Image (cartoon, helix red, strand yellow):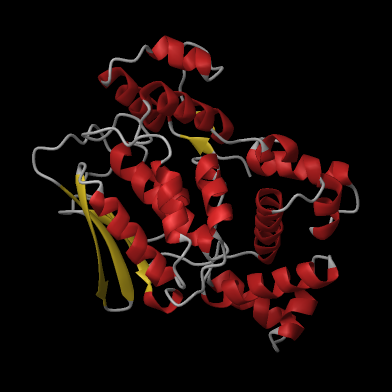
Amino acid sequence: MAVTIPATIVANILEGAVARGADPAAILARAGLPGIVGALEAPDFVRLVRAVTLALDDELAGLQDRAQRVGTHAIMAAHVSHADTLGAAYGRATGFMDLMDNSFRFSLRESGASLLFEMTRIPGRTVLNTTAVEMVLVLVGRMLAWMVGNRGALNGAWFEHAAPGHASAYRAMFQRAPMQFGQSSSGLAIPRALTRLPVLRNEEQATAYARRTPLDAFLPQDASAGLPLEVAVAVETCLSVEGRLPDMVHVAATLQMAPHTLRRRLKADGVDYSDIRKQVRRDMAVRLLATTGDSVEAIAAQTGFSEASAFIRAFRSWTGLTPRAYRKSEL
């Protein structure tokens, strides 16, 4: 499924560049984009963000009070990778980001069934537009979900700004979580039950992920918790061990329930079994490309494709890139 970034977010990124005195025409040329842009597909948006980042030497794209120099995100990713669990990873990320003392204070606290990751504006500091908040929450939430194998969901997300014109895009950006606007701060509510998930990525893998930012952050991602998470684990286990995608009958038997019961319960959660299979397959392919030196042909076989050409077509439909181009996609 292709991802389209709303025109407002694209304009907000360019606004940051202009605010720092950069030439927008030169940036668009560097990104290989036409002089007038609106909504962008994810790969084009990634090129734009990278062009802005490199032109400004600022991973925050000119949207906050001070520049965050290129390489800072990779240092944070390496630091976070040494946590044992998702909860500890959020703790490390929060402490690291708060040390930056830029436009926001960052904090972490428990509330009911959630662990709250919160960002509060520092009075008098520049926050250029809503994307200054959106990008931080998307990048942090996606990176930490990736740290535990792209598993997990959100209990909620809240924002200090009023609902923007592109608020409909937030459903995909924030995993279909319930949302609130016009709050005193912004943040993510992470289910406490998921905070015990183990961190699976090592420092080398985390640094490589950060260099690809924001590509991985804008791949499609569905929320996965409860029964959908159990199904995803069963699919991934079968794919890893046997190299094949199991059908619903196989997974239902693994979970000790009837296929019609599994179908009914997934439907009640608003999830389709075929979508879970596709996401597990895609996530495994992305992980193998990012963390191994296996050939495209070998990865195609490991992810259940009978031919490399079919895998390449599928991967392009997921990311807008070929597997080889994805491997090279770093700053």
Q: Is residue 282 visible?
A: yes
Q: In this orientation, which residue lies closer to the viewer: 10 or 308?
A: 308
Where is residue 301, by image quadrant? Answer: bottom right
Q: Position of residue 31 (x, y in %)?
A: 52, 20
Query: Could you tell whether 234 is left or right of 68 in the image?
Result: right
Using the image, determine if residue 294 lies above or below residue 3. Answer: below
Using the image, determine if residue 277 lies above or below residue 64. Answer: below
**Residue occupying the far left of the picture:** 124
Q: In this orientation, which residue lies closer to the viewer: 218 or 70?
A: 70
Q: Position of residue 16 (x, y in %)?
A: 31, 26
Name the residue at 21% across, 42% down: 102
**Residue occupying the far bottom of the picture:** 256
Q: In which quadrant will I find the N terminus? A: top right
Name the residue at 42% across, 48% down: 75
Q: Is residue 247 visible?
A: no
Count the labels in the image.
0
Using the image, determine if residue 37 lies above or below residue 185. Answer: above
Q: Position of residue 99 (x, y in %)?
A: 24, 51
Name the residue at 19% across, 53% down: 185
Q: In this orientation, which residue lies closer to the viewer: 301 or 281?
A: 301
Q: Position of residue 227 (x, y in %)?
A: 57, 77
Query: Could you tell whether 215 is left or right of 53 in the image?
Result: right
